[in-house]
Image (cartoon, rainbow, N blue to C red):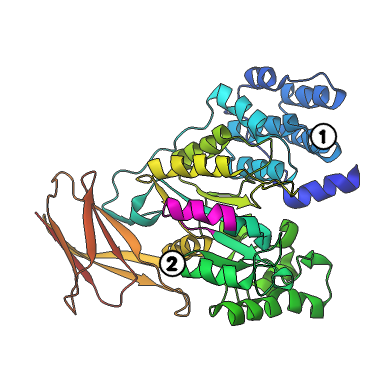
Amino acid sequence: TLLSLSIVYAQSPSVKKIQSKDINFTELVEELNLVSAPIYKQALEYIRKEELNKAIIALNEIISITPYDPRAYASLSLIYIKAKQFDDFLKILELAGRNQTSYDLIFEKLAAFNLIKEDPQNINQKIFIAPFKNNKKAAISFLFDDGRRSVYTHALPLFDKYNLKATILINPKTTPPEPTSQFDGSWTEWRDATKRGHEIGNHGYSHFDLTKLSEDDLEKEVNVSFSTITEKLGRPPISFAFPFDKFNTKTLAKVLERHIAVRVHDYLTQHYENIFIPSYGGKEFSTDTAQKFVEMAMIKKLWLVAECHEIQIDNIKSYKPMTSDFLETHLAYLKENENNLWIDTFSNIFIYLAQRKAASLTIKEETANTMTFSLKTTIAPKVPQIPLTIVINTAPTMPNAVKATIKETGQLLETRIKDGQILLNTPPQKEDILVEWN
């Protein structure tokens, strides 16, 4: 049990001192009173005594013993939400997904108490860099691990149908030259996917646990894999996802030698604070829960990084597969909400967020109908650029026409008006930008 518990701690939120002043403990005990097992009874007793950190330890012990039981995850989720520790709440949901428990039952419990509320927004900012492209409410990336052929044959046609892009993470060792394998996509197919705008990322050369390898083998799994993908597809992979989601400081440093976007929660939160990496697929994951994830993402301004595997076809058994019906229903729902959602590849969204984090915005001059500002960045020039969305609040005036130019060159920038605000898209510039409206 202790060994299992240490493994859980290595992948889940650290036990922190929780401030209890905002928690109604009587109400919380009633919400958590799910079963009569002894450890649960002990956890509830700790909560009654306002000893939440001891309750968290007890609930993590339950997870270490029965990782497929959704009730402890639901209980921890409630505690973290009540304690206003939203990032730890998201990490518990991520751990639940890795352990193949029922997301449906966890979210059923959370939805019953309507606990996920929108954060108050600062509406007085005169100018700011939008959290996401075109000031969308949330961002979503789909990452398909392992390079399975069913992703090429069944998933990508659906993404193409709705004009959406996906990221496929492959293992070069198991990638054949031509589509001869029933299980693995080929270099020919991944080249075609790249031409269609989808991203191919690195998932390790052989899909080994990188934390257990020698220096030479680690180099092969990360950098030889990088070079092979670059050679076969004609472009380097920007994104990386660790096999089995297992990593440590050493393996992360090795991956960052050549890759920019890495699917690790705490690494991603260095660039954007609201990251959620749920596991999509499996019989315990419904379209209703997937929709609730997206609704939560819009409420909390999340980057939702959907960790997927393959599409269920014939009698092939795999880890947490999803059906074509599930995927089409979900993509259709996303397309209907495209005004609020930025759906793009993992690397595109990461680069935007990394640029945003490194950028500084300064107003140089303004009048009732004009503004001159600078947009600088400290990010390395070698990083590909994606235009940032700048939002200007012109209240109390309401603009009906707008023009933005780079002052020194006179180059026009893409602009539009949305909800009474001016939106313009530009990469960081050396020169000042002038915006005029009437």
**Mark 2: amino acid:** Gln
Label 1 sits on residue: 62
* Residue pictured at 16% horizontal, 76% vertical: 410
Instruction: Tell me if I can see residue 238 in this picture.
Output: no
Left or right, residue 293 beside residue 408: right
156 falls in the magenta region: yes
| Amino acid of disc 1 | Ile
Kindly report the secondary structure that dominates the magenta region of the rendered protein.
helix
Helix or strand or loop: what does disc 1 sit on?
helix
Looking at marks 1 and 2 on the same chain, the residue that comes earlier in the sequence is marked by 1
Q: Is residue 261 above or below residue 114?
A: below
Q: Which mark is residue 355?
A: 2
Report the span colored magenta: 153-166
Q: Secondary structure at mark 2?
A: helix
Q: In this image, 347 relative to 432: left or right?
A: right
Q: Is residue 412 above or below residue 331?
A: below
What residue is rendered at 32% in x and 64% in y?
A: 361
**Residue drawn at point x = 58 percent, y = 57 percent:** 153
